[in-house]
Each structure stands twice: as structure tokens, then as C-alpha cells.
Amino acid sequence: MSALPAPGRALVVGLATSGRAAAVLLRDLGWDVVAVDAAPIDAADLESAGISVRAPSDEPVAADLVIRSPGVPREFAPLSAAYSAGTPVWSEIELASRAMPNPIMGITGTNGKTTTTELLAHLLREGGLDAVACGNVGTPMASLAGELPGDCWLVTECSSFQLEDIPTFRPHAAVLLNVTPDHMDRYPDFEAYRQAKLTLFAHQGEHDLAILPPGLDSSGRSRARRIQASGPPGPDAVSWAEGGLHVAGLGLVSPWSDIPLLGAHNRENVMAAAAMAAHAGLGADEIARGLATFPGVPHRLEVVGVADGVTFVNDSKATNPAAAIAALDAYPQGVRLIAGGSSKGTPFDDLARAAAGSVVHAYLIGETGPQIAAALDAEHVASSLVADLPTAVSRAAAEAASGDVVLLAPACASFDQFSGYEHRGEVFREAARDAGAR
């Protein structure tokens, strides 16, 4: 663990959840903290803790250290001024990792991060180890400082934005599940996005575990290991599917029939989590018990109910086309797809090709509805533009036959009509219940 510098003046840029946690942690560590945000915010709690809040503000602030919240682009004036001045700029996870003695596991990827993070934390706990899921999954690392025993594993979901500005952040085990175009509204090109993901491995040592997709190598001293969805295991295989889930050093851990998660993408998530759990010291039986009892993740292929033989599935966390394609893999026929939302700059041609084999009808909402409709039309997939999500659910339910699946897999961000994917998923749940789902 790298040491923190002596307390001085710190600037926290962005006051969403992780920025607030970073500001409080710095104040507790004796720093003089100034926090800024481009929007007006309720900052009474921060100000009562002795933190100077300037919001709304985009004025540069002189500081010895700057903490950048993941949602804030580098071009925001207080940040760009800090970079130009050579002031150290850290991600909140960099700050937290320096302030805590805990061992870290890091999970990144375009899709599957949350499921794998929650699953790994569950496996460790079921195996008798202290573990907490944190990071992009919802609980900032910085909010846990001083709250946990020193041997508690921090199972940390890391977005590409969080992996920028991490000069020393080192997970003892790390995985890049996959990388496909996403956040093209924030990165100049796909390569820049991919390099941000690879930063997760930059500071690992030779005895740490690094799991990467084929064709990508670790950026640190750890050797790249692979998960293999099919075929005999190769020399770098750390986990593989061969009549069931296998892990290097443990052999067969569990038959797939005993693992409740659906879809080929979830098999890969399971293989990654199992390999990382083994790296923490768990045995095959302990991992198998944890896999069998994992309840799943809200808003990720979540079955919210059945009405007249029609299954309603909430995959609101499918915020890009690749994630929506994975959902279609889990439900390969009879799908009434609800998609659309705010744009992230990604095309929908691959989604349309995947839909051609499984989607009976698509109900399209939001800003990107017309764009998705055009892509589906090119693949001869029937679709309709509808005003909002409750209307889409109501129409899909009315037109569905027994055995069909009403699947919310938006392939887009939610911010045109909702406060976030969680809000969108809750609206879907309520609409499904209104349609009789129980």
C-alpha cells in the first residue's frame, strides 16, 4: 500500500456519492478540503463536517491534491487547471486504497461487472472470509475507511472512469471480463477506452492474479491468465467449462446445472469469480456452495414475475448493445423486447442481428427509439415506437402469448427519461405488476 502525503489542501471535483465519500475521508485525515460541483447541490452535511463547498462553480482552486469523481470529464475547468499545473489528480479508489490496509480484488469490463462483483463477494463470505462489494457497484471504497477489519476483502467494481488517475492502485486479483465499444461520448476512440480498462493491471506484482480476454496482456508484472468457455484448457487457463465449471488447481467445482445464473455471459462471470475466490484461498466445495446460493443482482436478468404464462424480465442494467445481446442469449426465443433510451454513441446493428433470431416484436422508447427501429427494420424485425416504458410493458403484455418473455434490455443509458438504470428498472417492475405479473 502506498502512503498518503502529509495533509494539506485537497480539492474534490464532483459531489455525487464517491466525491462526497472522498471529501469526508480527506477531512477525517486532517486535510483542508474544498469541494466543487458544476450543479447546485444540497451540501449541508458536508459543510457541517468542515468542508468548504462551492456549487455551482467551475472556478479552478489551488490545491496540493485533487480527487476526481468518475462522472466528471477531464475538460472541466478545475480539473484541466490541475492537470496543467502538475497537481496530483487521483481517482477516489486511489485515495481509498492508500487510506486502507485491506486486500483488494478488482473487476472491470464493459458488461458483467456488477454481477461478478456481487457474486465474488458472496463466494468469499460463504467461504468464511470477510468481504464487501464496493466501488462502482454503489458503495464507495472511501466510505468504508475505518469501518472494516484489516483482513476484509474489498471486492471492487471498477468503471473505466474510475481507472483513470490511479498511480498506485493495486488489486491482488483483477479481471477484465470483456471490452466492447461503450462510452464513446467520453472517449476519443475505442482504443482509449480499452486502455483505460487495462490500467487495472498496471501496478500488480508477479504473484497477483490477472485475468484478461484472449489477445490482451497485463499492463503490470502479473502474467495474463484466461477463462475458456469451451474446449480443453490452454496453458494460461485459470477457469474453464468442460462438462461443468473447472478451476486451475481445484479441478471440477460444480456442474452447470447446479448454478442458477443463465446465459453464456454469466458462465464467464462465474468462471472469473470462481478463479478469484480460489486465489483468495477457497476450495472447490466452498465455491460450489456459494454458487448454488447466489441470489442474483437486481436489474440484471431479474425475473420480476409471470402472468398467464408470460415471463417479465428486468435487465435495465443492459445499458449498451453488447449487454442487451447477452440478455437475448439467455432468452433465445419468444422475446418481446423493450429497448431504447439516451444515446452513448454506439450503433445498434449487432443488436438487430441478434434480435432477428429471437425477438417477436420490439417496443422502442426514448431518444434512441428511431435509431434502433431503423436497425431492426434492416433485419426484418417488427417494432413499434411507444411513448414511455409503462406503455411499452402494457402493449407487450397485451400482445404476448403464453411462453413469451417480456424483456427490458434497453441497450442504452436511461437519462432521457429516468434518474438512472435503477429507476428505470423499478418503473418496469411496477408496470409488470400492473400487467398481472406475480
Image (cartoon, rainbow, N blue to C red):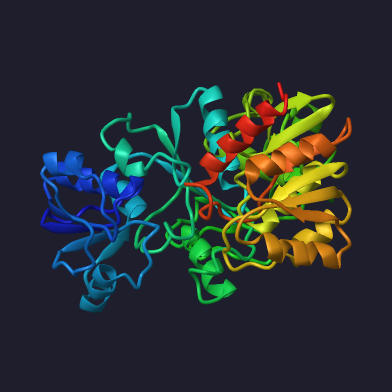
Q: Is residue 171 above or below residue 36?
A: above
Relative horizontal placement of residue 307, taking residue 206 as reference (left or right): right
Q: Is residue 290 above or below residue 422?
A: above
Relative horizontal placement of residue 74, taking residue 379 as reference (left or right): left
Q: Is residue 62 above or below residue 263?
A: below
Q: Is residue 422 above or below residue 322?
A: above
Name the residue at 36% across, 43% down: 141
Q: Quadrant of residue 217?
A: bottom right
Q: Is residue 278 visible?
A: no
Name the residue at 61% across, 30% down: 430
Relative horizontal placement of residue 311, taking residue 420 as reference (left or right): right
Give the total of numbered labels.
Answer: 0
The residue closer to the viewer here, 181 or 420, is 420
Q: Is residue 257 visible?
A: yes
Q: Quadrant of the C terminus?
A: top right
Q: Which x, y percent locates residue 302? A: 66, 33
Q: Quadrant of residue 34?
A: bottom left
Name the residue at 42% across, 59% down: 203
Name the residue at 57% across, 30% down: 123
Q: Which x, y percent locates residue 412? A: 61, 56
Q: Which x, y percent locates residue 431? A: 65, 33
The residue closer to the viewer here, 270 or 220, is 270
Q: Which x, y percent locates residue 93? A: 36, 51
Relative horizontal placement of residue 55, taking residue 70 as reference (left or right): left
